[in-house]
């Protein structure tokens, strides 16, 4: 279905992560309305109760706010979004470094690789 | 609150020798999407037929909302059988009026909306529709009811991926929020993400009933992989 | 709910019998016109055509009344015990209501079939008499005469026994209107008890019921044979009709209860 999810990891965590990313990347801009649980569940092809749980978690963390009139919207607290972005980046970096070390790369090799791979973009 | 469906010591035997269900005791909670899984001959279809009153048990009992299968449980159970039961000569409009006349919980406007989205004419006769379209029409009728229990027998068997997505989306968007959906299938991978719970059946009895997130969390496995492990011979 | 069931059932089940009845009535008019060409010394070809038309009408009579009966039986089987049964038996109605909603239209059509056949014969015969008398082959006076003669003969047998005879005929016809559909529905329901070959089971059950029915009828009929004084056959016929009528009434009622039990307590859809 529309969302690519691994069936061997808790679905709830994967949905949570995915919506966080969508918010951080600006796909769901601050202040925009999030579709209903039912709609999102149908889009993702997941259980509505699981989707509900993920959205509740997002609400608890403050990234999503429930407005009385317009339902769930993305927070307009830019500071918080920035913080989540940092956190996600840190997690990715840690994962990347772990994998590189498994391949036998040392710190210097990793830095050189990054330098080489990102070199084109800066030019 | 007690479960939506309570099954106690249910036994059903065919032809003296073949035992389809043996002393089955089971509770289906409210508000969950539950997968009914098991190899062929494990008693899934027999259980479904008993829930719908299409078979009569030899012993034991089934209570749906506290009542034995009968006219009043049939009024709140919406059933999608594996086969198509639509009359060949009937038009879509006649079917809608039949459902509206008999099921108080039938929402004709919802059914019409879904039919329109698929561009199925209300004047069309069932005989003129393709097998895939007939199956969709039947699903639309079943999912347009605000039932307490939806029983879907192999809803995605033998359909292409696009149709499968349509079917799963239709189920998710339309089932009544407080209702329970029981889906029997052998295509676990296709369906496991939409489940709350799974029931594994084997040789006419309950092998296991658990939450799917528990399987993923505790075993680190998909339901499909876990099923293979449990039923490995 | 029975009302709603009946409404849907009647609408669904009546289309084909209506068409068949209409065809028969049209055919009776067409065959009736064949009398137009009858006169002394007509050509062999037209005589042949006329006889063919009469035969066609005769076969149509049988085909239509059998066709309606078979159609009703197949419809009962199809909606109760095939894939369509999955919808029929998950409607929020009781087994008894379902059964009645099937049986009532079957009984009504079994009655209407008799009426339609009667009408068709009346049209055919009426037109025959009309055209024949116009050609001068029969005179109305002659017909009137022979009818009077027949009535006279019957009166000789005694008017009391005549009334009883007519009553017995009516009795057996009315019971038959109920007995026919009940035999079919009962046989189909009983056939479901067979594991694999359920249609064969139904056919077997039908002939089984027929055989039992005939044996019982014989047992009722035989003693009356011995009481026959050889002079006036009317009381014997009256007694036989009342006897057979009562046997089929008992069979009908018994079959109803068996069928209701099977539908409500022994449903076993494949």
Image (tube, coloured by chain):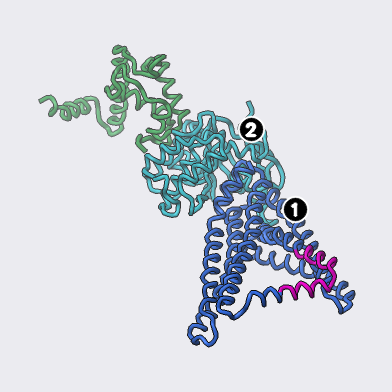
Q: Secondary structure at mark 2?
A: loop
Instruction: Tell which chain the image draws in green.
Output: A
**Residue sitting at 49 percent across and 82 percent down?**
C46
Residue C156 falls inside the magenta stretch: yes
Q: Would you name the residue on which mark 1 appears?
A: C257
* Chain at tag 1: C
Rendered position, A100 above or below C197: above
* Chain at tag 2: B
Residue C235 place in picture, x, y as percent: 84, 70
- C97 or B211: nearer the eye? C97
Mark sitting on residue B65: 2
Residue B109 visible to an observer of this rendering: yes
**Residue sitting at 25 percent across and 30 percent down?**
A105
Residue B140 falls inside the magenta stretch: no
Mark sitting on residue C198: none
Residue C5 place in picture, x, y as percent: 60, 45
Task: Give the prevailing secondary structure in the magenta stretch.
Answer: helix
Rendered position, A76 above or below C17: above
Chain C, colour shown: blue
**Residue sitting at 42 percent across and 47 percent down?**
B123
- B183 or C11: nearer the eye? C11
- B209 or C209: nearer the eye? C209
Q: In the image, which residues are magenta? A: C147-169
- B211 or B69: nearer the eye? B69
**Residue sitting at 63 percent across and 53 percent down?**
C105
Chain B, colour shown: cyan
Residue B130 place in picture, x, y as percent: 40, 52
């Amino acid at each position: 279905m529309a969302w690519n999810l691994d069936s061997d990891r808790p679905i709830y965590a994967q949905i949570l992560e995915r919506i966080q990313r969508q918010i951080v990347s600006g796909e769901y801009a601050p202040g925009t309305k999030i579709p209903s649980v039912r709609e999102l569940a149908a889009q993702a092809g997941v259980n509505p109760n699981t989707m509900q749980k993920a959205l509740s978690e997002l609400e608890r963390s403050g990234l999503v706010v429930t407005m009385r009139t317009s339902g769930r919207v993305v927070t307009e607290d830019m500071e918080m979004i920035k913080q989540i972005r940092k956190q996600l980046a840190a997690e990715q970096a840690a994962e990347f470094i772990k994998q590189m070390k498994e391949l036998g790369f040392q710190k210097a090799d990793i830095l050189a690789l990054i330098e080489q791979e990102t070199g084109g973009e800066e030019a | 609150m007690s479960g939506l469906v309570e099954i106690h010591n249910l036994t059903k035997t065919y032809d003296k020798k073949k035992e389809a269900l043996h002393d089955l005791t089971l509770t289906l909670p409210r508000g969950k999407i539950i997968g009914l899984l098991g190899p062929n001959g494990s008693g899934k279809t027999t259980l479904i037929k008993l829930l719908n009153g299409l078979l009569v048990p030899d012993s034991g009992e089934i209570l749906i909302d506290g009542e034995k299968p009968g006219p009043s449980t049939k009024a709140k159970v919406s059933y999608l059988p594996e086969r198509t039961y639509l009359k060949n000569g009937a038009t879509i409009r006649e079917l809608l009026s039949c459902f509206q006349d008999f099921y108080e919980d039938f929402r004709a406007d919802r059914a019409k909306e879904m039919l329109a989205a698929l561009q199925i004419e209300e004047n069309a006769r069932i005989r003129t529709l393709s097998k895939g379209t007939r199956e969709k029409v039947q699903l639309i009728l079943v999912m347009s009811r605000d039932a307490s229990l939806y029983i879907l027998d192999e809803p995605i068997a033998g359909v292409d991926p696009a149709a499968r997505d349509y079917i799963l989306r239709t189920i998710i968007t339309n089932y009544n929020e407080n209702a329970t959906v029981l889906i029997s299938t052998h295509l676990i991978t296709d369906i496991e993400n939409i489940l709350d719970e799974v029931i594994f059946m084997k040789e006419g009895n309950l092998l296991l009933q658990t939450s799917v997130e528990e399987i993923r969390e505790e075993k680190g496995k998909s339901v499909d992989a876990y099923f293979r492990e449990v039923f490995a011979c | 709910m029975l009302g709603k069931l009946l409404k849907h059932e009647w609408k669904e089940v009546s289309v084909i019998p209506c068409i068949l009845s209409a065809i028969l009535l049209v055919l009776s008019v067409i065959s009736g016109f064949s009398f137009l060409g009858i006169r002394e010394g007509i050509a062999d070809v037209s005589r042949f055509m006329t006889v063919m038309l009469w035969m066609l009408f005769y076969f149509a009579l049988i085909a239509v009344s059998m066709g309606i009966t078979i159609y009703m039986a197949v419809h009962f089987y199809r909606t109760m015990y095939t894939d369509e049964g999955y919808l029929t038996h998950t409607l929020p109605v009781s087994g008894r209501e379902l059964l009645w909603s099937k049986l009532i239209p079957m009984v009504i059509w079994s009655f209407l079939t008799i009426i339609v056949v009667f009408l068709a014969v009346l049209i055919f015969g009426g037109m025959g008499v009309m055209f024949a008398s116009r050609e001068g082959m029969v005179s109305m006076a002659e017909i009137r005469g022979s009818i009077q003669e027949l009535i006279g003969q019957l009166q000789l047998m005694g008017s009391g026994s005549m009334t009883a005879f007519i009553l017995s005929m009516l009795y057996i016809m009315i019971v038959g209107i109920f007995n026919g559909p009940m035999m079919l529905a009962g046989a189909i329901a009983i056939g479901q008890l067979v594991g694999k070959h359920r249609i064969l089971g139904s056919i077997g059950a039908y002939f089984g019921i027929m055989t039992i029915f005939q044996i019982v009828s014989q047992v009722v009929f035989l003693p009356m044979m011995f009481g026959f004084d050889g002079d006036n056959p009317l009381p014997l016929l009256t007694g036989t009709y009342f006897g057979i009528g009562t046997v089929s009434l008992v069979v009908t009622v018994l079959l109803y209860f068996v069928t209701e039990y099977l539908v409500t307590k022994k449903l076993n859809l494949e």
